Amino acid sequence: DAGITQSPRHKVTETGTPVTLRCHQTENHRYMYWYRQDPGHGLRLIHYSYGVKDTDKGEVSDGYSVSRSKTEDFLLTLESATSSQTSVYFCAISEPDTYNEQFFGPGTRLTVL
Amino acid sequence: GQQLNQSPQSMFIQEGEDVSMNCTSSSIFNTWLWYKQDPGEGPVLLIALYKAGELTSNGRLTAQFGITRKDSFLNISASIPSDVGIYFCAGRYNNNDMRFGAGTRLTVKP
């Protein structure tokens, strides 16, 4: 298995509070991604990073920001969580020459009350 | 945006039966991928397809990249209980824009 960990694995928070999810990899892969998974929607890309300090928006980026100060860490921040952001969040990594083959972390289940 | 229609949404089959599921899109994709997700875990890549018409196997799994580049199917032969899970198709549109189907939930009865 690719060395990808996500923390926390579960979180319950209240509407309006800031939340930061962390993805950590030990594979030294250049690309990192954040997805959300909701019933009936599969996985949808929130943001991705193609290198340290290089990030770009995905399909559903509104309400989310990301940062990547080190190769191994990719942070997803919800500045002011809303109930619509209740979801399971997955991090993924890939290499440029095989960027189709994304390896996923175990996921973080976030509940916003 | 690119939308993928994956069917069926769920399947209940007997152990030993073959399974077929597919994904269609109104737009062209450059790459098709198939993932499996077990409960409480992230998706795991099963098969990647890079050329229209390509047929690729991985053990009991076979997948094809449609000639029109707008569809793909996945077949599982002689299903076993550990095949249970959710199967996702994914199409790569450009560089890092990959779209996923909603998934096919497979249940295998022993």
Image (cartoon, coloured by chain):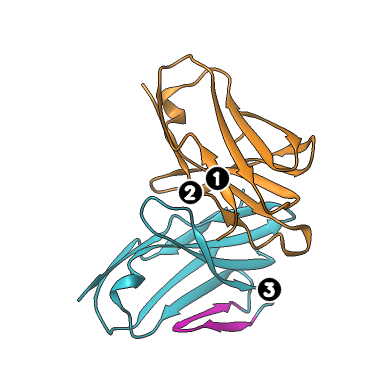
Chain colours: A orange, B cyan
Badge 3 sits on which subunit?
A: B
Residue indicated by mark 1: A5
* Kind of residue at badge 1: Thr
**Foreground pick, B68 / B15:** B15
Residue indicated by mark 3: B50
Residue indicated by mark 2: A106
Residue A28 image offset from top left, x and y in percent = 73, 51
Q: Nearer the viewer, mark 3 or mark 2?
A: 2
Q: Nearer the viewer, mark 1 or mark 3?
A: 1
Residue B55 image offset from top left, x and y in percent = 59, 84
Q: Which residues are magenta?
A: B53-66
Q: Main secondary structure of the magenta part?
A: strand
Residue B54 is one of the magenta-drawn residues: yes
Badge 1 sits on which subunit?
A: A
Q: Answer yes or no: do the residues labelled 1 and 3 have beta carbons within 8 Å?
A: no
C-alpha distance separating marks 1 and 3: 29 Å
Residue A95 image offset from top left, x and y in percent = 74, 58
Q: Answer yes or no: do the residues labelled 3 and 2 have beta carbons within 8 Å?
A: no
Helix, strand or loop at disc 2? loop
Q: Quadrant of residue B45?
A: bottom right
Residue A37 image offset from top left, x and y in percent = 46, 44
